[in-house]
Image: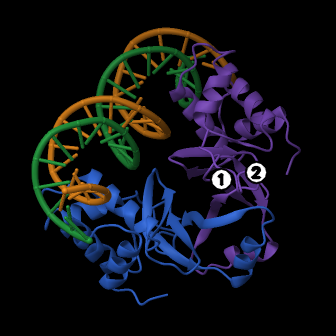
Chain colours: A blue, B purple, C orange, D green
DNA sequence: CTTCGTGCAAAGTTTTTGCATATGA
DNA sequence: TCATATGCAAAAACTTTGCACGAAG
């Protein structure tokens, strides 16, 4: 895989016949700054609108879909929304049911082999989502922020 | 684990201090009939309303939450909705992006060990979601039903 | 110049909430 | 009796759609 950089995203969009627009460049800038990390369409919107004030959530959804179709970001659903991430290494996403924070957790290689040996199924995407209490929230009472 | 039966769900609700209502019994009847299987709140609603015509989706959500809190069903999010299932064995859920069908897929025990050895995290729930093309849809053109 | 993307408004889905009434334990 | 559940309506949260205009290639 190419090193993460804005060019990586731009090239991937071009290869998939997407046009390069100022709005897309701003979303790329945001996404690239969040490596590794997890973000929602709303997160991207709130950040990018500071530079592109006329942009709308619908356009953010469009752009994130393009970046995903170009193979540069992954998505998974949790807590009622779609989360995006740039981490292409196979991993789990641990979601703390107390504070809501999402943390990447490592997974052994054996599982990857398992998943590639499913008779009859062509696996294109895998998401492993764990929930529970994170280290910081263990023994601490509080509400999700 | 107890054998799956309506009593299993009723007992679990009682142990968690939930009341047994006719509406809950009908949802239990539905859930128990879908073992193994995957269903949404809407699926339950459409079935149960035939016997309990005044029931509403809000009540279905309430009951499914109670059954989940009582530890009898699991849930995961995919395709924009929450799916419920009774399968308590650790497994993956393969979602065909062509026909939408969800299929349980077996996972080796190694992963379970991995997931139980996450330093600092208390794992309460795990969902492994795979997407791609199922056997039936491989090589077949069509739209999701 | 032609196709694709953006901005806007509106609608579609799924899920939650508040409250009065009804009911299980 | 009394805490909890139900039914209803309304709202909230997230995502998609249609269309006219604008911009990239």
Can residue B99 be seen in the rendering of this structure? yes
Residue farthest to the right? B3
Q: Quadrant of the C terminus of chain B?
A: top right
Q: Mark 1 to mark 2: distance in Å?
A: 10 Å
Label drawn at residue B136: 2
- Depth check, front residue: B100 or B26: B100
Labels 1 and 2 positioned on one and the same chain: yes
Left or right, residue D18 beside residue B145: left
| Image x and y of residue B98, in percent | 62, 50
| Image x and y of residue B21, in percent | 67, 22
Mark toward the start of the polypeptide (1 vs 2): 1
**Disc 1 + disc 2, Cβ < 8 Å:** yes
Q: Residue at x 33, y 74 (%)?
A: A31
Q: Residues within 10 Å of mark 2 (few under 14, many from 20)?
A: few
- Which of the chains bears the disc numbered 1? B
From what the image shows, is residue A35 above or below residue B43? Answer: below
Residue on which the image places disc 1: B96
Left or right, residue C3 beside residue B106: left
Left or right, residue B32 beside residue B47: right
Element assignment for label 1: strand
Element assignment for label 2: loop
């Amino acid at each position: 895989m190419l090193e993460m950089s804005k060019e990586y995203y731009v090239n991937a969009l071009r290869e998939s016949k997407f046009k390069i627009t100022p709005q897309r460049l701003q979303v790329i800038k945001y996404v690239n700054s969040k490596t590794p990390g997890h973000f929602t369409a709303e997160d991207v919107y709130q950040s990018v609108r500071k530079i592109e004030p006329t942009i709308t959530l619908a356009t953010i959804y469009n752009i994130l879909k393009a970046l995903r179709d170009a193979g540069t970001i992954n998505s998974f659903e949790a807590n009622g929304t779609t989360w995006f991430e740039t981490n292409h290494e196979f991993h789990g996403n641990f979601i703390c049911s107390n504070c809501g924070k999402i943390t990447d957790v490592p997974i052994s290689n054996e599982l990857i082999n398992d998943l590639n040996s499913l008779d009859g199924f062509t696996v294109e995407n895998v998401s492993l989502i764990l929930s529970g209490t994170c280290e910081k929230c263990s023994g601490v009472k509080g509400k999700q922020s």
